[in-house]
Amino acid sequence: MKKIGLIGGMSWESSQIYYKIINEKVHALLGGFHSAKCVMDSVDFAEIEKLQHQNDWKALDEEMVKAAKNLENASAQLLLICTNTMHLCYEAICANTTVPVLHIAVETAKKITAKKCKKVLLLGTQFTMEKDFYKTILKNDFHIDVLVPNEADRKLVHQIIYEELVLGKITSASKKTYIQIIEKAIKNGAEGVILGCTEIPLLIQDNDVAIPTFDTTRIHAESAVSWALQTN
């Protein structure tokens, strides 16, 4: 079994779910007393959130590279950035470490392709919905059309993430808001919805909407286990 390195804390609410899913999957596949070989470098999200909203991605690159190097020094053999948004720092991490990094958008796109969905709604932070780093992979590498909510709805989605979900606050009103946004996308041809912030699965599950949901937290974590258990 290879050792998985997790860059966590963004937020710790979703990072603990990564740890849980990874260990549950290892146990399900290997049985007995098996659990995952893993190590986490967890950042202070207050510092990260401040830099995000200052649009200081150079400083964020430096923080993520620092965390990645800590994991490399701890003998991690695969790295996970336990957040969708911070994959904006993916290239900086790859350029400054020798450990492979499993990209959350790539693993999610594989699942979308397997479901034969051609058009999907992308929900996440405004950074994820509005910047191209995520959508480009889906469009160019997997030929998946990507819808995002209108500007007002993007602000609502983002606000709920930062003011509620990262703090562990789950409300029926916010759930209803997300469902309404998804229903609008269904009318525009969405065949699936990417829960493209690792906190969104705390609020929305498969049985809440009429189209498949793609839980990026679970997809990313389970893909890491598959990689870690490869024998080659």
Image (cartoon, helix red, strand yellow):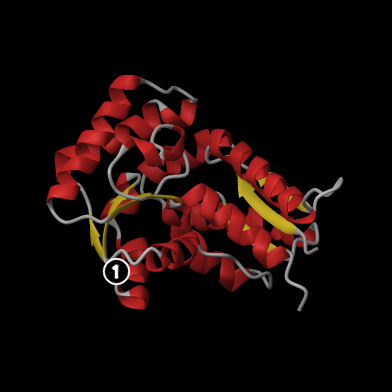
Q: Is residue 194 above or below residue 42?
A: below
Q: Quadrant of residue 131?
A: bottom left
Residue 45 rendering spot, x and y as whole percentages:
53, 37
- Residue at which label 1 appears: 144
Left or right: 126 with respect to 62?
left
Residue in front for this viewpoint, 75 or 95? 75
Secondary structure at numbered mark 1: loop
User: What residue appears at the point 66 percent right and 63 percent down from the top-left corner?
Assistant: 226
User: What residue appears at the point 79 percent right and 55 percent down from the top-left corner?
Assistant: 30
Whether residue 230 is visible, yes or no, is yes
Residue 13 rendering spot, x and y as whole percentages:
55, 33
Residue 115 rendering spot, x and y as whole percentages:
38, 63
User: What residue appears at the point 73 percent right and 52 percent down from the top-left corner?
Assistant: 26
Left or right: 59 with respect to 66?
left
Q: Is residue 15 above or below residue 148?
A: above
User: What residue appears at the point 37 percent right and 37 percent down from the top-left corner?
Assistant: 207
Left or right: 131 with respect to 46?
left
Position of the C terminus by quadrant: bottom right
Identity of the amino acid at label 1? Ile
Position of the N terminus by quadrant: bottom right
Q: Residues within 10 Å of mark 1 (few under 14, many from 20)?
A: many
Residue 227 rendering spot, x and y as whole percentages:
67, 67
Whether residue 83 is visible, yes or no, is no
